[in-house]
Image (cartoon, coloured by chain):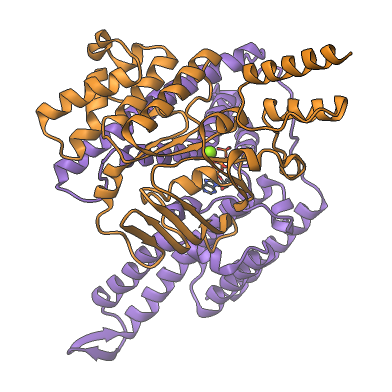
Amino acid sequence: MEISFKQVSYTYQPNTPFEHRAINDLSMDISSGSFTAIIGHTGSGKSTLIQHLNGLLRPSSGKVNIGSYQLHAEAKLKGIKELRSKVGIVFQYPEHQLFEETVFKDIAFGPSNFGVDREEVGGRVDQALQAVQLPEELLDRSPFELSGGQMRRVAIAGVLAVQPELLVLDEPTAGLDPKGQKEMMNMFHQLHKQKGLTTILVTHSMEDALAYADHVIILNKGEKYLEGKPEDVFTRQQDLQKVQLDVPEVIQFITNVKDRFQVDLSYHGQTIKELAEELAAIVKGENRYE
Amino acid sequence: MNNAFIIGQYVPGESIVHRLDPRTKMIIIFMFVIVVFFANSIWSYGLLTVFSLLCALTTRIHFSYILKGLTPVWFLIVFTLLLHLIVTKEGEVLFRIFSYPIYSGAVAQGAAISLRFFLLIMVTSLLTLTTTPIEITDAIESLLQPLKKIRFPVHELALMMSISLRFIPTLMQETEKISKAQASRGVDFRTGTAKERIQAVVPLLVPLFISAFKRAEELAMAMEARGYQGGEGRTKLRELKTDRLDIIVYALFAFVVILLFVIRD
Ligand SMILES: Nc1ncnc2c1ncn2[C@@H]1O[C@H](COP(=O)(O)OP(=O)(O)OP(=O)(O)O)[C@@H](O)[C@H]1O
Ligand SMILES: [Mg+2]
């Protein structure tokens, strides 16, 4: 799904002493099929921004286009349920939204609400469960008997079962162990490629953004601060430091090597392993000349 | 949706009213509530109105915001007025609406009662607007101290109050968060038959209860871990102090009350 924000502002509790402008005059375009990472310091408006994507919030001014749907301040959107069936949002700590007696019922909740046939729902639940790598035995258990990580997966399966075209992830790996984080990010990446989804990932992890995204947007105090390809954005160390963001380790390493040894490795999407090999080649090469 | 949550919500500030001892504010408001019922003439109502408006002004909170906080009771005020206009049949007929007589007594009484109502609610809302919930609980605990003699659990009551007050905003936020998550999964809280709407509440209430219980348990553990064992021998972080400012305010209020009794009929 094609998404565009045109001069969007959003104000919480307008016309009160608690008035707070969380998004300020923000314009951006996200193309269909892209994997976009949204990064920003705490309170920079990331969660507010993504709530516009399925009409939970309407902009206080400006326009938001999501596919053929348009949100603006003046009027409510008519086909909002239809929009929500096409946009899946995994919120921060999604396990808080579990409520059914069994895992099956909870995963089936979304598709049933959007009017998917009974028979089809069963198939979708199985698919979603597989996607999040949970065993089928869990289907009849209560979601509240599961471990935190399993609950998170069930909640995510509940969003996937709706089969959205646009998948929005708000810090989906927060609070998981490192291995679980990696597995989960790989799973989202896999889904993204397989299903041709448009994916938007809100994250605090520069590593994830660098590894998975093809488009990065950096927010600062409700405004768009930087935007571009990950390798372009993340090499602007000084600009990032101004908004208290770090540079991914790989790029930090390359910069350090350049400062210490005047060797320019230049970043072009290497993993740490490839980088090590490149470095080894250079070291060996230098040895040979001596 | 967000507007509902600000009614009577504390607005931080540095005004004289903010700085008063919360006990002073509560005692004066309590007296005011009684005194309002002694007003019986235009002048006495005028005096109380001026006093209330002056109080509202000294809080330095926008008057329009104070009035907005009263939105839920406007209906009640207007309703009282209308009821009086229709039912009361005293004095002479002032004018007729579609041949229905409106009496002068009805206008006077209706206006008086509505004004009373308005003053009461506005002045009480000034308390919550200028005093943090914690200060209010401290004040209640301190004012109820005498009841301890008859074994009334003052400290426990105050603790319960401050915990509930502390968690109201948290619960509100949680409600908003979960209802958004469920709305994204296709729950429609606004339309549908009565039965459908009641069903729509289940996915909201279950997670709310679960998180509330979890919170309660965590809080209890945290309190125990920090050695909480009831009010006995516990010292206070915030001491309430009645100082010169409070005495001046008491004096001013006493003056207003005396004046009221002088000018009332
Ligand atoms: N319901 C609300 N009412 C009032 N203000 C809000 C509300 N939700 C968020 N805000 C404010 O809007 C700003 C942006 O909040 P938002 O949740 O979008 O930040 P975020 O970038 O997602 O932060 P984090 O990384 O901590 O999740 C914050 O300053 C926050 O205090
Ligand atoms: Mg957030």
Letter of the chain in orange: A
Place of residue A220 in the rendered image (x, y in percent of width and height, measured from the top left): 64, 48
Q: Nearer the viewer, residue A176 or B108?
A: A176
- Residue B142 picture location, percent across and down: 65, 35
User: In screen coordinates, is B13 left or right of B197?
Assistant: right
- Quarter of the C terminus of chain A within the rendering: top right
Image label count: 0
Query: Residue placed at 37% from the left, 12% from the top?
Result: A146
Seen at 53% across and 33% down, the residue is B161
Of the chain colours in the picture, the one used for chain B is purple
Q: Judge left or right: residue B170 versus residue A97.
A: right
Point out the residue furthest to the front here.
A289
Task: Identify whether B121 is placed above or below B10.
Answer: below
Counting from the top left corner in percent of width and height, residue B150 is at 55, 24
* Residue B181 place in picture, x, y as percent: 37, 37
Farthest residue toward the right? A290
Q: Residue at x 73, y 58 (%)?
A: B15
Q: Give the residue drawn at x 51%, y 19%.
A: A182
Is residue B128 visible to us here? yes
**In the visual, does A12 lie left or right of B90?**
right
Which is nearer the eye, A239 or A138?
A239
Judging depth in this view, the residue of B73 and A168 nearest the camera is A168
Find the residue positioned furthest to the top.
A137
Q: Is residue B37 visible?
A: no
- Where is A144 relative to B196, above or below? above
Above or below residue A277? Residue A72 is below
Q: Quadrant of residue A242?
A: top right
